Amino acid sequence: MKIPVLRIYTIGYLLFLYCPIVILPIFAFNNSTAVAFPLQGFTSQWFVNVFHDAVLGHALKNSLLVAGSTAVLATFLGTLAARANTRYQFKAAGPLMGLIMLPMVLPEIIMAMALLVVLLSVGIPLSLFTIVLGHVLVCTPFAVAILTSAFQSLDKSLEEAAYDLGEGPFSTFRLIILPLVMPGIISAMLICFTISLDEFIVANFLGSGEPLLSTFIYGQLRFPKNVPNIMALGTILVGVSITLLALAEFFRRRGLARTGAKDTGGFL
Amino acid sequence: MTSGKPTMIEFQNVHKYYGDYHALRGINATIKAGEFFSLLGPSGCGKTTLLRTIAGFEGISSGVVLIDGKDVAAVPPNQRPTNMVFQSYAIFPHLSVAQNVGFGLRKDPLSAADKARAVDEALAMVGLSGYGARAAHALSGGQRQRVALARALILKPKVLLLDEPLSALDKKLRENMQVELIKLQRQVGITFILVTHDQEEALVMSDRIAVMFEGQIAQLDSPERLYRLPKTRAVANFIGTMNFLSAQILSEAGGKVEVEAQGFGRLQLDAEKQVTGAPTDTGATIGFRPETATLLFDGQQATDRETMATVEEVVYYGDMTYYDVLLDGTSAPVRLSMRNVFGRPVLDIGTRTRVGWSAGALVLFR
């Protein structure tokens, strides 16, 4: 019999990728401070701890603030870039888009260090705001990628039709373009939010000591007795991330269906 | 039939460059009010560009475009008395049919009730009464086309611009829409300007047609004149099919041109009605349409003249049969189209046959 090499490889690949994530909720409900098999019994104690941890609450608030601001800013900038890229032809378009997309593949630690050096030499004190700046840099390429697909699926003659029927450029944008790319905008905001929420390197380098979720989790790992709490928190974060990404994809597809375009790519 | 009407649109030596590309090369034409006018040509000939200069979506590099006597160089599309039906129809997918049709009335000071009535009337005009509440993205191609028409006509433009509006429809629907568009145009009396690459569509629908090649108008004429007396061989080939045989001009005098044509011998043609041509055509050529000559079956007499020929190819179309025949004394076959008659056999390849033709149906390109 032929050995199904590709099938075995695929299954192995998926196991390697997702087993660690499945471990997370298992130990989050395990009644032991030691993260080890055999399991000791069921408890929801760690989740209760998570909800009563004041520092964690503070970190969560900061994280939501940073992620929210990042999502709005990165999506706004991404909208401008995607619109310019799809609607107008200019000489520098190729290199310019390349530069905007570069942070997607640039090593984050190098970017974070470079940013740190620049901010310090310019004299901008580190704060949540500087983290937001870093996150915007990281997230904008994702927003541009999603929104470019949204703008590209938009028939140019829709704009011309609105113009032809008496509207100016701004009312055309408001009445026709914005409603049609809105699903893409929501999708971009959700993805940027998720990325910012999970991001550690920039948060660690550009932070002022104010805790974010990611840096808080990193700090807690030093205390073995707190590890189960982190497992519980991790479980919640995985759940929230998956929900947000699924929502983002839902909106992206709805946008395509609305404009009647064919689906090409996407993140999920 | 439109000669007495006032001019609606006038092009004066219009040029358009895209970088180095010369898209429009000196367009001069007038379009009359109430006319059904077509811009016909192969893709890339500049017909859509010319249409878009009327709408205001394309600026021009030099020259003048006048709409209703006014130079529109500085008038943006949203202030021109023109409306457009786009090739893709450009129906706003997030709005209902009624919202689409009423879109142009947004800034109109009419009351909401008057606007609703106008939308209903526009929908009734295109045969879509009762469709107002439907979602636009759920419409069929033919219905989208009608919504696009209603949306453009509701503003009562002086000129309606149609950019290949029927090219996305299947054959049957296209033919129906052609007739409906003609009726609609007569009913509203607005100047219609149609861009198409389909010569049949242009012939069926238009009062006048401008045939365009490479950014220039090759000929501007009524459908019958374009078909009967094309100015160049390129126009003749684009509008239907024409057979060409080489010829030599022997003499010209008193409104008559005497030629020696391959296969047809010595002929006298009417200089005004049968002689045409432009510098682009090299050497004299005799042309005739496939339906102006006919195969002669047993017992049939030629109405004018006849020549012997050999059948080289037979293409059967059901109602028609196309015969490619080699006329005696010629080197290349010509195409004849014969309406099929019940009981008459389709000839085989290689058959010797008589071909009847009339000198009056020939055209001389010099």
Image (cartoon, grey):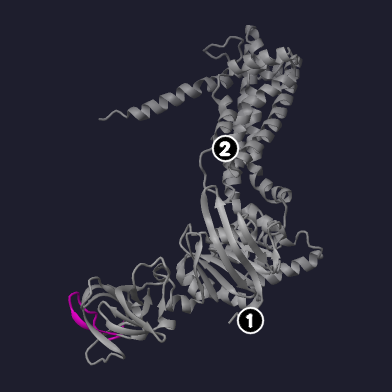
The foreground one among A225 and A44 is A225
Quadrant in the rendering for residue A223: top right
Query: What is the secondary structure assignment of the residue under circle 1?
Result: loop
Q: Nearer the viewer, mark 1 or mark 2?
A: 1
Secondary structure that dominates the magenta span:
loop
Q: Amino acid at mark 2?
A: Lys
Compared with A52, B38 (above or below) is below
- Quadrant of the frame with the N terminus of chain B: bottom right
What range of the chain is rendered magenta? B340-356
Q: Amino acid at mark 1?
A: Gly
Query: What is the secondary structure assignment of the residue under circle 2?
Result: loop
The foreground one among B311 and B227 is B227
Is the C-beta separation of discs 1 and 2 under 8 Å? Answer: no
Q: Residue at x 75, y 22 (%)?
A: A61
Quadrant in the rendering for residue B54: bottom right
Reading the image, the residue beneath label 2 is: A91
Q: How many marks?
A: 2
Reading the image, the residue beneath label 1 is: B4
Which x, y percent locates residue B211?
49, 68
Query: Gap in Å between the C-alphas at discs 1 and 2?
Result: 50 Å
Label 1 marks a residue whose chain is B
